Amino acid sequence: MTRQLITSALPYINGIKHLGNMVGSMLPADVYSRYLRQRGHEVLYICATDEHGTPAELAAQEAGLPVAEFCARAHDQQKAIYDGFQLSFDWFGRSSSPQNREITQEIARELHANGFIEERAIRQVYSVADGRFLPDRYIVGTCPHCGYDKARGDQCENCTRVLDPTDLLNPRSAISGSSELEVRETKHLFLLQSKLTDEVEAWIAENGDNWPVLASSIARKWLTEGLQDRAITRDLEWGVPVPADTWPELAAAGKVFYVWFDAPIEYIGATKEWADATGGDWRSWWYEADDSVRYTEFMAKDNVPFHTVMFPATILGSRQPWKKVDYVKAFNWLTYYGGKFSTSQKLGIFTDVALELLPADYWRYYLMANAPESDDSSFTWDLFASTVNKDLADTLGNFVNRVLSFSRKRFGDEVPAGAENGETEIALGAQIADLLAEYEAQLDALNFRKAAQALRALWSAGNAYLDVTAPWTQIKTDPEAAARTLRTAINLIHLYSVVSEPFIPTAARTIRESFTLADDTRTWITPDEARALAQVPAGTAFTVPPVLFAKITDEDLATWTERFGGGAQ
RNA sequence: GGGGCGGUAGCUCAGCCGGUUAGAGCAGGGGACUCAUAAUCCCUUGGUCGUGGGUUCGAGUCCCACCCGCCCUACCA
């Protein structure tokens, strides 16, 4: 059993995340974490809110709150939603934590000591009315090429040309609208990534081959172009301050590190938050841990360059034995009817609203069974309803209900004894063992769609077994055989409750709690146990749980499609 | 402009290093069954594998060109 370090990309502090954010990082990381824990691995699943940067400051300003207060509230809000999704973080931290500040500054000092940080003066647009330097995209104006009057300083959305903010005609602040802009000189720290390109390339060559192409190809693309030196500080109020002991002048000027510099370091910082809170040993996971720990990162494709190139460059340049990622699981986008989920246009489904409509298991299963692993995938209400109804309600939920109801009706509140297992049960056991092996193999390989398919095949096998044995017929001629069938089917139900937990933890627990089984501490099923189908002995008391998954009705669909604008695009 | 990924049945997707009649689930059609959330199980109709060339005994799978979608292109995160 290895030690498994798992992180999912940090959700940005500002705004409620939508289902696309959920399926691309936190949810698969949770499914994987739960699976590995169940298999007996020592797992540490770490996530956090990413709290620094211009958008957070502006959102706080708009909310009329001090940025620290704004972020504290937003963090709690996000945390509550993730609890609702049953995300089993070992720690859900904050990139604004003292722990992250400490480690970020430490790594910056190490980079400096090794000659990978340089101070440079750059010229940047300053908005007098807003009292802040503006990132390029926060400057709008008229495009000099096409005349579009809402072009952003980084790119014109109309003609797609890449721009410099000083190219814009009639430039103004996107925040206040003020045209009182000046180009000012400001000093920043640059990470000399150009000096680290070869090392990162060698590291990718050695480690990236097994990653999904989505991750490795993006990484290689950046490297073939050669890494450029990159500014890692900003002129903002809210961020990790540049340490005064190393850069007194910049510290005095109030410089903070760029959000993308401190955000990945928060994986380490959050682990220290966890250690400080629980007495855990954070260093054993992150420092000189290369042989004992396997580290898997989950993220959507937009995050890949930062995780495969820039962060590794930072770590390599520190010359310290920080743990580097072993496997990068990258996802494409989940779209809403082929279009982008959009906060500003209120398009799509957001995590808070999702939980108001239906319990987490419905979303968890649907999202993972249709995860955008090889390409963007499209959320549609029709597919959602058909997946939930067919797989969860009909195949699994109905199986549990039909077996337990029938058994109770005919044999009472305990698992019936009945005849010894016959050929049908032996064949079933072999089939279940095979399907379970397939399910495990797909989860081990982080193929979530295929894992969900294998799980559904396990559920379906139970229904097929009932069809072959037909206990409602057996009961008339051979009650012992009927009892055997039900005993076996009940054992399947218990097996399902164990192995389904990564995808549908709440329903799995509900099913499991319907058995009064002493010492039921089993967390996984061995091949022999799968073949035997005898973990729940005759005589075990059980109850029939309430309907596990309610079906989504046509009325529900009509209501939600109307409310969320499904298909309109 | 440059680059990456993708374009396979009505829908969502599998198809490893090229090799016999291109697969799954859902939807559609037929049948079986009645324990169960009108559930289940079995059978089955759908595809000139984006387009056009090329390599090969043989290509969805390799090469070239083009079309379409998404993403990246370093100051959003």
Image (spheres, rainbow, N blue to C red):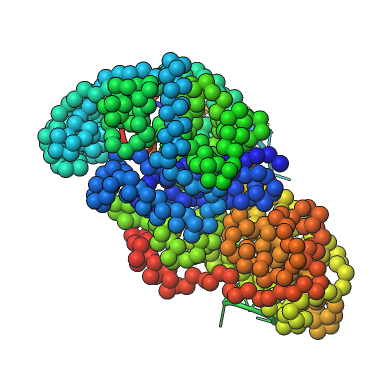
**Foreground residue among A457 and A314:** A314
Res A408 seen here = yes
Left or right, A37 with reference to A525: left
Left or right, A257 with reference to A29: left
Rendered position, B56 above or below A147: above
**Which quadrant of the figure contains the C terminus of chain A?**
bottom left
Q: Residue at x 65, y 39 (%)?
A: A3
Rendered position, A179 above or below A408: above
Q: Residue at x 59, y 59 (%)?
A: A505
Question: Residue A229, percent across and down?
Answer: 38, 21
**Foreground residue among B75 and A294:** A294
**Foreground residue among A127 and A558:** A127
Q: Residue at x 44, y 66 (%)?
A: A357
Rendered position, B60 above or below A108: below
**Which quadrant of the figure contains the N terminus of chain A?**
top right
Question: Residue A403, percent across and down?
Answer: 70, 74
Place residue A146 in its image quadrant. top left
Q: Residue at x 54, y 49 (%)?
A: A89
Question: Residue A67, percent across and down?
Answer: 30, 45
Res A146 seen here = no
Question: Residue A77, percent across and down?
Answer: 40, 55
Total numbered circles: 0
Rendered position, A367 above or below A112: below
